[in-house]
Amino acid sequence: MTPTKGYAAQSATTDLAPWTFERRDVGPHDVQFDISYCGVCHSDLHQIRDEWGGSIFPMVPGHEIVGTVKKVGAHVKKFKAGDLAAVGCMVDSCRVCEECKNGLEQYCTGTGMVGTYNGREKDGTPTYGGYSNTIVVHEDFVLHVSEKLSLPAVAPLLCAGITTYSPLRHWKVGKGHKLAVLGLGGLGHMAVKFGVAFGAEVTVLSTSPSKEEAARKLGAHKFVVTSDAAQLKAVKGYFDFILDTVSAPHDFGLYLSLLKTDGTHICVGVPPEPAQIHAFSLLIGRKSLAGSCIGGIPETQEMLDYCAEHNIVSDIEMIDIKDIHKAYDRMVKGDVRYRFVIDMATL
């Protein structure tokens, strides 16, 4: 076993604090890499507080993980010591169901995907995430990272990046499409970057007029303040797609009215309460309300390769691990542009 340093929540009511635990030995198909940086996702906070239920304690959060390979198993073919490597939101799946065979491990219908943290390995051992100094993962769930990109800024691509890349690719959003990005945070800023790179006309929908300058710097072509009735009226029936990154309660009917006939509203944010949607919001205009999770391993690697080719990374603010709860407080207030990343050298 490998002694490992991390930051863990011991219960839903305690703060993260230093905790020492053990990683498994490197097996024949495993990759061990030392963690350099770990992104901070809103889901980290939800899960350490057990807001979604079923949390496993002690919990070491973190699923936007990048670092350098330290050791590989005897049968590992894809990595060697010294390579840059990354792990996202999952570390295993059943491998044999139809979804897994099609590279959609995130939708595994066998055992279900195994979360990088707050999950259980097939032997029942809890998984511990990237707020730690090292990790051991089967090579099939480890990703290659280009040396062309800033490593800290790559970390959020493993969740915020793939969560927005995957639906845009699935619905083939690109040239000739009018895409609205609802919300300009960790997810939203990546959606803008990808939408622009794919050739779509991108509009940011936001409650905050102060975000217009930032949205345009990211490449957005238009900006609409959703509290301004006149601005909303001007884009009624305008968009082919809305990518909804908002995790706070909001009026889906209002945004569905902004779609063209056959338009699609794609949810990637998770509001705390079920939405109320009138059927006429969908019937009039034959509109669709859809959702998307992260991407599978092949698509996540495709995204990382695309980002290397097009020089796309997240906009980040680096923090020390000891400041994680201050970062959570600021994240909840939306006071970050656009993703916190922990420098694990501060552990």
Image: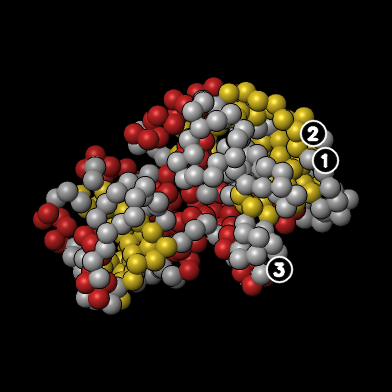
Residue 81 visible at all: yes
Residue 150 visible at all: no
Q: How is the image coloured?
A: secondary structure
Report the amino acid beneath label 3: Val
Q: CA distance from mark 3 to mark 1?
A: 25 Å
Q: How crowded is the residue under tag 1: few (<14 C-alpha within 10 Å), some, or many (20+)?
A: few
Q: CA distance from mark 3 to mark 2?
A: 30 Å
- Quarter of the rendering occupied by the C terminus: top right
Report the amino acid beneath label 2: Thr
Report the amino acid beneath label 1: Asp
Residue 168 lies left or right of residue 3; in this view the side is left
**Which residue is labeled 3 in the image?**
96
The location of residue 343, given as percent across then percent down, is 58, 30
**Which residue is labeled 1 in the image?**
25
Give residue 172's quadrant in the image.
Answer: bottom left
The location of residue 199, given as percent across then percent down, is 40, 65
Please tell me which of labels 3 and 2 falls first in the chain.
Answer: 2
Q: Is residue 335 above or below residue 209?
A: above
**Which residue is labeled 2 in the image?**
2
Give residue 5's quadrant in the image.
Answer: top right
Q: How crowded is the residue under tag 2: few (<14 C-alpha within 10 Å), some, or many (20+)?
A: some
